[in-house]
Amino acid sequence: MNQTIKIGVKENILSFSLLVLINFFVGSMVGLERTILPTIGEEVYGLASTSAALSFIVSFGFSKAIMNFFAGSMADRWGRKRVLLGGWAIGMVVPLFVIFAEAWWMIVVANIFLGINQALTWSMTVNMKVDLAKPEQRGLAVGFNEFAGYMGVAVMAAISGYVASRYSLAPEPFYIGIVLVILGFFLSCFAEDTNKHVQSQVKKSTTADLSTKEVFKQTTWKNKNLSSSSLAGLTTNLKDGMAWGLFPIFLSAGGLSVGQVGTVVALYPAAWGFFQLFTGIWSDRIGRKKLIVSGMLLQGLSLWFMLIFQTYSMWLAGAFLLGLGTALVYPTILASISDVARPEWRATSMGVYRFWRDSGYAFGAILAGVFADVFSVHWAIGIVGALPLLSGIHSLVRMDETLSIDD
């Protein structure tokens, strides 16, 4: 008997809710090391160079970016659920490598596997939610996905900071990672593959399919809306790569305790995660462009705010504003990509966008490390802070409103 495929969040609420929960654990894998790894590099392994200390972010960023590029075509070929489960299986390597690490290179390698884990699992949860949602619900779907993921980042950043202050920087916090992988894999076994939902939408489409090479060109430079989104995503994560690596060092040098550093570092993704519940839905109502432009500008200004007003309370305020600015952008760009890309090559276009976006982690860590070594940590934050501002201006000038584009 043929089962009627229903499209819509309400119509698929159980599958949708399970995917939200799964992505909480996906984000938790990143949050686990966000507070403590830069400090481990300096205090445990004696890395004097900031560039060397941030090498784990470079390995994470490039591995995630490259795997993002292939994740979409892998999903189209093998199915979303298989790729999701494969991502969790690879994730088990991460905590084990860190727990048994005897040298810094093992930490760097662990983050290569973390990047692969994040690319496969996070890509699949967002694509599967978009598959389930109606066109006018894409902002909502992506908003819930990113909310869950970055709340996981925030919660685990705070927990790992607490465990590190109570016990030690390693290995105790990373025992939690083993539990996260087991829970994520177990829950993913019950997730419904959404390929049939994609096929039901493709049947309604009359446009020709595009090759992977052509989708890459469209998303990178040929289509002004897709390429503007790619640039905004890249500079957003470039800023985040810098923040990931330099915030613990910057805040510690400012006299904060490990617990206070953990609070500031956790508040940024907490605001980022929480407000995505609203910004994704908001973009379904007022459009994508306004939120993308304003979010990019707010990110840059927030970083400069934290450099100018150097007190604990002001750093908390700056972290909150930085998270809010990122929340305006993150789900909105994904929804905008979904507006423009056709169902039959949407996952591939998402993969190309996420390739450029997450390469920003690596470029941000490289630039932050070089600028911090040559000038200072303060200068590195200030210079990197200018890039989201420039990207916001670029989106204002070049990008169209994509919400009205017919599916």
Image (tube, rainbow, N blue to C red):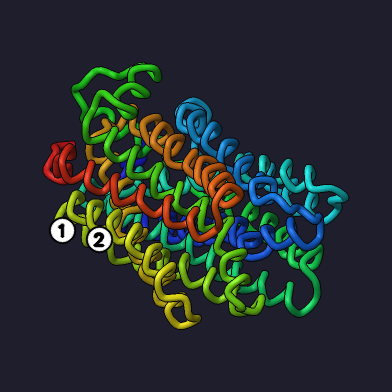
| SS under mark 2 | helix
The location of residue 136, given as percent across then percent down, is 20, 50
Residue 82 visible, this angle = no
Of all residues, the one furthest to the bottom in this rendering is 313
Q: Residues within 10 Å of mark 1 (few under 14, many from 20)?
A: few
User: In this orientation, does residue 313 appear?
Assistant: yes
Disc 1 is placed on an element classified as helix
Residue appearing at x 17%, y 46% in the figure: 396
Instruction: Looking at this view, name the residue that lies furthest to the front.
Output: 375
Residue 206 falls left or right of residue 269: left
Q: Choose top left, top right, bottom left or bottom right for residue 172.
A: bottom right
Q: Which residue is mark 1?
A: 285
Mark 1 and mark 2 in contact? Answer it, CB < 8 Å.
yes
Quadrant, the N terminus: top left
Instruction: Count residues near mark 2 (Cα–Cα under 10 Å), then give few for <14, some for 14-19, many for 20+.
Output: many
Q: How many marks?
A: 2
Q: Position of residue 225 (x, y in %)?
A: 22, 35
- Between 239 and 185, the one lying in front of the other is 239
The residue closer to the viewer here, 170 or 125, is 170
Reading the image, the residue beneath label 2 is 281
Q: Residue at x 40, y 71 (%)?
A: 308
Q: Residue 201: which quarter of the image?
A: top left
Marker disc for residue 337: none
Identity of the amino acid at label 1?
Arg
